[in-house]
Amino acid sequence: MGNDSRESFGSRLGFILVSAGCAIGIGNVWKFPYVTGLNGGGWFVLFYLLFLLIMGIPVMTMELAVGRASRKSAVQAYMALEKPGQKWHLHGWVAIFGCVMLMMYYTTVSGWMVDYFAKFLTGTFTKGMDADAIGGVFGGMLAAPKEMGFWMVLTVVAGFIVCSMGLEKGIEKITTVMMAALLILIVILAVHSLLLPGAGEGMSFYLVPNFENVKAVGGITHVISAAMNQAFFTLSLGVAAMEIFGSYMSKSQRLAGEALRICILDTFVAIVSGIIIFPACFSYGVHPDAGPSLIFVTLPNVFNNMALGRLWGTLFFLFMTFASFSTVIAVFENILSFAMDMFGISRKKASVICCIIILILSVPCVLGYNVWSDLHIIGGRDVLDSEDFIVSNLLLPLGSLVFLLFCVTKWGWGFDNYIKECNEGTGLKIPYAFKRYFQFVLPVLIVIILIQGLM
């Protein structure tokens, strides 16, 4: 069933870095530290790692297996593997809709990262600015549709230019450089944070499990459910974002090992982001449970008080830019691949058409903070939060559930076909004994996440 003209990665490292780049995004670097802060630190991190192992990696192997077995993008992948007359491929359309919807707001947030990188680089934040003035910079950016629009357009156009150059020459080449730079930057920033006065207190809050902290934030069940959510969302599973890279993979490596490697890179970045943020916050007397404003209000305040703060701020937002842009490129590739497979158009043509569509669809999110700031769509949420609610709370868990049921039930592709695809090649093997766990326990865990998200 293989498609011989299908592009493939130039190297295994390229595949792992691009796939990890897709998973490593704003969720790791922005959401993980503040959710850890809100959920009492150490115990949360411990449960997060556990759920990655028992949920994240298995579901990732399913997306990769569907991609690699079919050698096609989402809709046609299901078509190639489902039994005649079945309708699993309808989820392929939903998954692509999810990718498009994710990019309707992610491009704006990615633009914020570039904007802040430029602000630190050019010296917008000056020594002696008070916390209100620093918060005012963020407010000022949100109130300026032209400024936000400029950075959003830059992000979208740059992303499609990279994708138009092809898988190996564009995406793999650029992402490999970005990810290498990201990993170097994150280590430099973490070492710097660890050397700050009072860093030890931040580290013990972050990584030492402490029941007092757990009690203060609402008890252990609350922490477990938050950890389960974060572990699930961090890998961007359910909208075929990983499936597409499976379709470019070689058969030489077993999928469990590759999923584990992607997961380790993703987790490394999340954990080290916390090592950058917690010591810095504690060192400057800021509590890290500031929620979403942590990165744009709290951290610039911290950098501003540091020696060489402008340098550290610039490096931090460069790292954030790489983290978010690697996800943008990966999801754009999924949308492009779908357009090329479904409509038989060339990569260049697909890039132009998709670029125009994403640009138009990204406008509401930019305007949602200024011109349309009175617009509240889902349960009083603004445009960005409404779009994020649909993607994060509905499409990701539902999509993961569909991939899971497709792979492990007799009404879909079937467990035997899935496990055979997973265990082809060398490396870490998934034991057949996991069948019952995959069929009966995993679906329940995902349904719990779905219900929690909707509540």
Image (cartoon, rainbow, N blue to C red):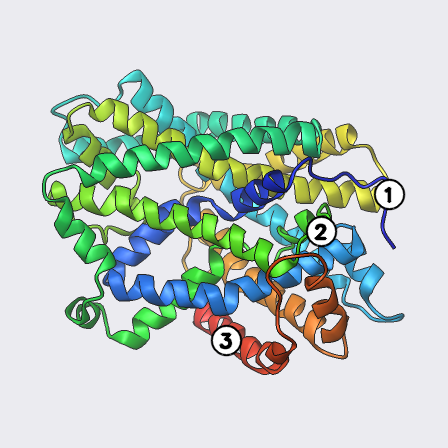
Q: Which circle marks residue 446 in the picture?
A: none
Q: Residues within 10 Å of mark 1 (few under 14, many from 20)?
A: few
Kind of residue at badge 3: Leu
**Where does residue 243 sit, x and y in percent of width and height?**
67, 53
Extreme residue toward the front, this view: 426
**Where does residue 191 sit, x and y in percent of width and height?**
25, 37
Question: Camera-side residue: 404 or 420?
Answer: 420
- Foreground mark, 2 or 1? 2
Q: Is residue 364 visible?
A: no
Which residue does the numbered mark 3 point to in the structure image? 445
Of marks 2 and 1, which one's residue comes earlier in the chain? Answer: 1
User: Image quadrant of residue 333?
Assistant: top right
**Where does residue 364 sit, x and y in percent of width and height?**
52, 41
Distance of mark 3 from mark 2, alpha carbons? 31 Å
Question: Camera-side residue: 59 or 101?
Answer: 59
Q: In this rendering, would 381 be left or right of 416? A: left
Of marks 3 and 2, which one's residue comes earlier in the chain? Answer: 2
- Which residue: 65% across, 28% down? 170
Check the picture and name the quadrant holding the C terminus: bottom left
Distance of mark 2 from mark 1, alpha carbons? 16 Å
Q: Which circle marks residue 4 in the picture?
A: 1
Q: In this rendering, would 26 be left or right of 245? A: left
Distance of mark 1 from mark 3, alpha carbons? 38 Å
